[in-house]
């Protein structure tokens, strides 16, 4: 049954963005609310009246950016908007994924649905029909500086709406006018303000941020699961996770992580088997998991707040306030808040990689772990997981330069009219790279700690950790001799990306924090 989602400019959540982005064709239908429809029509009528008066108003009957002082004749206004779209299609590089592009279109439609932009109703409705019919414009990743809106990437979407762009439709690359007519529609005919309204806003960086937050919400829980598996793999202690300790430093993220760890390790036979082993204090990568994972969770909480607000913000320029009879130029298209938040989240997620890599090293090192070197029964003849650790180290190191903040950079453009920019799309793109590296690093830790658990058999870990172990073993067998390990890493990565590992754990002990 097809699910209907009403777009009104106010109610989008991070989960909505994810659900629409990843929905298969026919799973859902997007529709503009009746109130939004009327607001859009009213604003468009207001734009028409401005055109009739002939007074210069930026974005309606003037040039753009540094050319804002040039007044455009009434008969040239449609050409002005088309020229804007064509000239701004300067994106380069690989195209965004289907999912990211769908999220971008959803956010742009939601912003325009607020009724402050003066855009034609047909433009918004065609964006929604693109999503409904799984028509995906080809949008290059690079070319936005994150102020005056995400002009270049959004222009490629606008070009598709007017029938001049390229789209993926039914799995094929085709001209957008073909796809539009194939679904029984016509390309948008741009009127005054339409082109600028379609491309002036933060939809690209906000889409990147929303999908990153959704991925990160799962990965912070998986980081706790991986750490708990490793604690039992090296026969560590859970003493440092005692609630009395964390009650004295009650950062919300730290408390959540400590609660998760205790739930995950509850009723572990391995943990119970060495009460007198003398391991009073584990290394920081085990002992300080709540403090480190908790701090990373705080970066996620802040970014989630910023992105959630941005999802329903009006980021066009200029904005039309019908009740006050005003058109006001401002700067809501500027992406500084999102850019800084995404840079902050990248740092938090990179720290999860840092500490995971250290835990992997502890499992490789027999001096600490009391396990065979590199977790292979016959080390020397076999190298075991030696180089899997090296891969984790490489990705951890890569994250360090990816965490250089994009938001501190600014390159003035448009003859210095647009003299401070956010680089928000750059921040979002590298955040997704950090997320991918984190996923792989956690996959490597699961490859190692499930192997470490093998050496403690017949003792078993907790029910939650055994659920992880059993599910990994369905695709990744116990390591007896050397084999091609990248396939194992990829298999575990798929279990993470498909949400299988987290689901298996939560089936046993309930939802993690």
Image (spheres, helix red, strand yellow):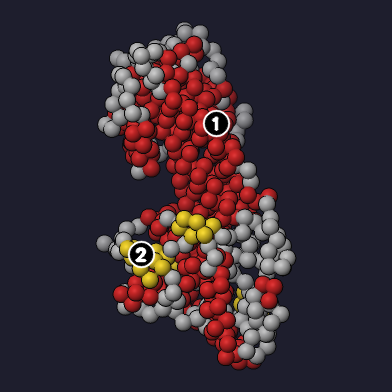
Relative to 346, does residue 75 appear above or below in the rendering?
A: below
Marks 2/1: CA–CA distance: 41 Å
Q: Are marks 2 and 1 in contact (CB under 8 Å)?
A: no
Q: Quadrant of residue 372?
A: top left
Q: What element carries label 1?
A: helix
Q: Residue 237, image x and y in percent?
A: 48, 17
Horizontally, residue 47 falls left or right of residue 276, namely right
Q: Residue at x 64, y 75 (%)?
A: 64
The image position of residue 235, as x and y in percent, is 44, 16
What is the crowding at mark 1: few (fewer than 14 residues within 10 Å), some, or many (at least 20)?
many
Image quarter in which the N terminus is found = bottom left
- The residue at which mark 2 appears reads as 173
Q: Is residue 37 left or right of residue 75?
A: left
Counting residues from the start of the chain, the first of labels 2 and 1 encountered is 2
Image vertical order of residue 156 relative to residue 504, above or below: below
Q: Which residue shows up at 44% across the image and 42% down it?
A: 218
Q: Name the spot of residue 346 as percent of width and height, x first.
A: 56, 43
Mark drawn on residue 157 = none
Residue 269 is at least partly visible in this image: no
Whether 404 is drawn above or below 375: the answer is below
Q: In which quarter of the image is residue 180?
A: bottom left
Residue at mark 1: 354
User: Which of the pair 390/209 is nearer the observer?
Assistant: 390
How many residues crowd mark 2 within 10 Å: few (<14), some (14–19), many (20+)?
A: some
Q: Which of 362 and 242 is in front in this view?
A: 362
Q: Is residue 191 above or below residue 429?
A: below
The residue under the point 36% across, 17% down is: 382
């Amino acid at each position: 049954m097809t699910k209907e989602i009403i777009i009104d400019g106010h109610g989008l959540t991070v989960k909505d963005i994810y659900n629409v982005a990843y929905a298969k064709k026919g799973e859902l239908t997007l529709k503009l609310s009746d109130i939004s429809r009327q607001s859009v029509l009213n604003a468009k009528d207001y734009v028409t009246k401005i055109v009739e008066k002939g007074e210069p108003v930026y974005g309606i009957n003037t040039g753009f950016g540094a050319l804002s002082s040039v007044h455009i004749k009434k008969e040239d206004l449609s050409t002005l908007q088309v020229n804007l779209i064509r000239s701004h299609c300067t994106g380069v590089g690989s195209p965004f994924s289907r999912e990211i592009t769908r999220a971008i279109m959803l956010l742009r439609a939601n912003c325009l649905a607020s009724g402050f932009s003066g855009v034609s109703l047909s433009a918004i409705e065609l964006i929604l029909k693109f999503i409904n019919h799984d028509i995906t414009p080809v949008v290059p990743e690079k070319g936005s500086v994150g102020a005056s809106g995400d002009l270049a990437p959004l222009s490629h979407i606008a070009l598709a709406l007017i029938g001049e762009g390229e789209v993926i439709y039914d799995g094929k690359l085709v001209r957008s006018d073909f796809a539009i007519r194939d679904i029984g529609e016509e390309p948008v005919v741009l009127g005054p303000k339409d082109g600028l309204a379609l491309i002036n806003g933060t939809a690209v960086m906000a889409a990147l941020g929303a999908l990153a937050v959704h991925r990160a919400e799962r990965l912070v829980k998986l980081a706790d699961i991986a750490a708990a598996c490793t604690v039992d793999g090296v026969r560590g202690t859970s003493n440092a996770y005692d609630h009395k300790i964390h009650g004295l430093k009650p950062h919300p993220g730290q408390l959540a992580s400590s609660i998760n760890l205790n739930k995950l390790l509850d009723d572990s036979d391995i943990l119970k088997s060495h009460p007198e082993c003398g391991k009073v204090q584990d290394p920081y990568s085990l002992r300080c998991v709540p403090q480190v994972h908790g701090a990373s969770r705080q970066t996620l909480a802040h970014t989630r707040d910023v992105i959630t607000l941005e999802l329903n913000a009006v980021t066009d320029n200029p904005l039309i306030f019908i009740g006050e009879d005003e058109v006001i130029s401002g700067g809501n298209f500027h992406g500084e808040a999102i850019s800084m938040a995404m840079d902050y989240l990248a740092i938090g997620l990179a720290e999860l990689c840092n500490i995971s890599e250290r835990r992997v090293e502890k499992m490789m090192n027999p001096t600490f772990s009391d396990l065979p070197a590199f977790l292979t029964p016959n080390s020397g003849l076999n190298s075991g997981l030696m180089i899997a650790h090296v891969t984790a180290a490489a990705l951890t190191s890569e994250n360090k330069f990816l965490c250089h903040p994009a938001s501190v950079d600014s390159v003035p453009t448009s003859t210095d009219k647009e003299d401070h920019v956010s680089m928000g799309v750059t921040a979002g793109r590298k955040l997704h790279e950090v997320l991918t590296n984190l996923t792989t690093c956690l996959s490597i830790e699961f490859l190692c700690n499930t192997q470490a658990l093998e050496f403690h058999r017949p003792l078993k870990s907790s029910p939650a950790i055994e659920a992880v172990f059993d599910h990994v073993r369905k695709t990744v067998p116990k390591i007896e001799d050397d084999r091609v390990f990248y396939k194992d890493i990829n298999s575990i990565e798929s279990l993470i990306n498909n949400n299988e590992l987290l689901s298996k754990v939560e089936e046993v002990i309930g939802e993690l924090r």
